[in-house]
Image (spheres, grey):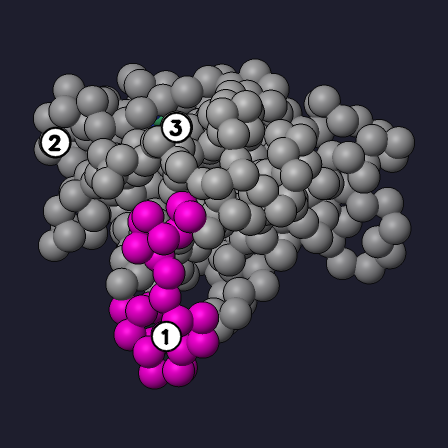
Amino acid sequence: MSNDISDLKISGIGRVTINRLIDAGYSLKFLAVASPSIVSKTTGVPVEKVRLIAAEARKLLGLEGEDFITAKKYMEIRKNIEKISTGCKALDNLLLGGVETEAITEFIGEFGAGKTQICHQLAVMVQLSKDEGGLDGRAVYIDSEGTFRPERIVQIANAKGLNHEEVLENIIYARVYNTDHQMFLIRKIFDFIDENIKLVIVDSLISNFRSEYPGRENLATRQQLLNAHVHDLLKLSMYNIAVVVTNQVVSSPDVFFGNPLKPAGGNVVAHGCTYRIWLKKGKENKRIAKIIDSPYMSESEIIFAITEDGVVDV
Ligand code: ADP
Ligand code: MG
């Protein structure tokens, strides 16, 4: 099945409209699941036309199913969900096995907490066989802070006895410099999901949004765009992909008791991410990880370490 929208033939939808969607980076797979109002806002194509196109895309992709299903059937569907081991038993235990497909897992923490290290490690782990905790898959790494290091991938791959050349080949990398580019690239991923993409990393989710839309006066626009972005990521995850994002912490001046730090991005990120893990620095190379708001996991804490071999148990 081609993922190209240029072949779509729908009465009432002309070339100009189709071209606008193509220019904005939309693909068939994306349109099939995207929110018509968001697509309409970003392209100027009227929402009714986007709905028609989305319906056609779903038909072509065979995604037209029953809207209502029983909980039993939903449980069957959830059995398709797979997990990627983090390569660290303590972290895996915290995550009930690893990072999940069809979900967004968010690693939150201050500078140096280990977010980027976990991302590097997962980009290697996803490539392992299922028996070894991977998904025999490839990773996409979206780097908004310029902290991706292929040399670090080589170290981690070697520590696992893997051929590092092959491991590097299976990580598709992009450095992004602004929010438009970041959102555009996520939509582009829908074009090559079929190339065995099982993990998409965005490190970090937030930094471009914060620097481009600073201050209270830009808050509404920033949150609106961030919301669209998080939804794009959720849609991506529905194609049996694990999405992993990192997030910074900000201080909230209105807190009198307890932790004055909170994850950036407010409710938009809090509601969009399925699993949220807060990382804190411990002594030397030790790190503490804790789950915050999960639908069914307990709020326990674990300790891991960062060494030359990657993210490891202590
Ligand atoms: P952040 O949460 O800001 O993304 P990082 O994931 O970049 O933090 O973690 C940085 C930490 O990882 C540093 O404390 C650094 O010492 C450690 N680290 C990075 N590379 C290595 C390595 N090759 N060997 C040991 N520790 C490393
Ligand atoms: Mg980082």
Q: Position of residue 206 (x, y in %)?
A: 62, 34
Element type where label 2 sits in the image: loop
Q: Position of residue 102 (x, y in %)?
A: 39, 55
Depth check, mark 2 against mark 3: the one in front is: 3
Element type where label 3 sits in the image: loop
Left or right: where does residue 207 sit relative to residue 192?
right
Q: CA distance from mark 2 to mark 3?
A: 41 Å
Q: Give the residue pinned by disc 1.
A: 74
Left or right: where does residue 252 sit relative to residue 107?
right
Name the amino acid type tagged 2: Leu
**Residue 229 or residue 202, whichever sits in front:** 229
| Residue 100 in sight here | no
**Residue 215 or residue 238, whichever sits in front:** 238
User: Is 67 a magenta residue?
Assistant: yes
- Screen quadrant of the N terminus: top left
Residue 6: image tag: 3
For the point 20% across and 22% down, the residue is 169
How many residues crowd mark 3 within 10 Å: few (<14), some (14–19), many (20+)? some
Taking 169 as reference, is 107 above or below it? below
Name the amino acid type tagged 3: Ser
Q: Position of residue 132 (x, y in %)?
A: 14, 50
For the point 45% across and 76% down, the residue is 68
Residue 162: image tag: 2
Report if the CB atoms under discs 3 and 1 are less than 8 Å apart.
no
Of pointers 1 and 2, the one earlier in the residue sequence = 1
Name the image quarter holding residue 164: top left
Q: Position of residue 137 (x, y in %)?
A: 21, 40
Left or right: where does residue 72 sit relative to residue 213?
left
Depth check, mark 1 against mark 2: the one in front is: 1
Residue 32: image tag: none
For the point 51% across and 58% down, the residue is 274
Left or right: where does residue 16 sit relative to residue 118?
right
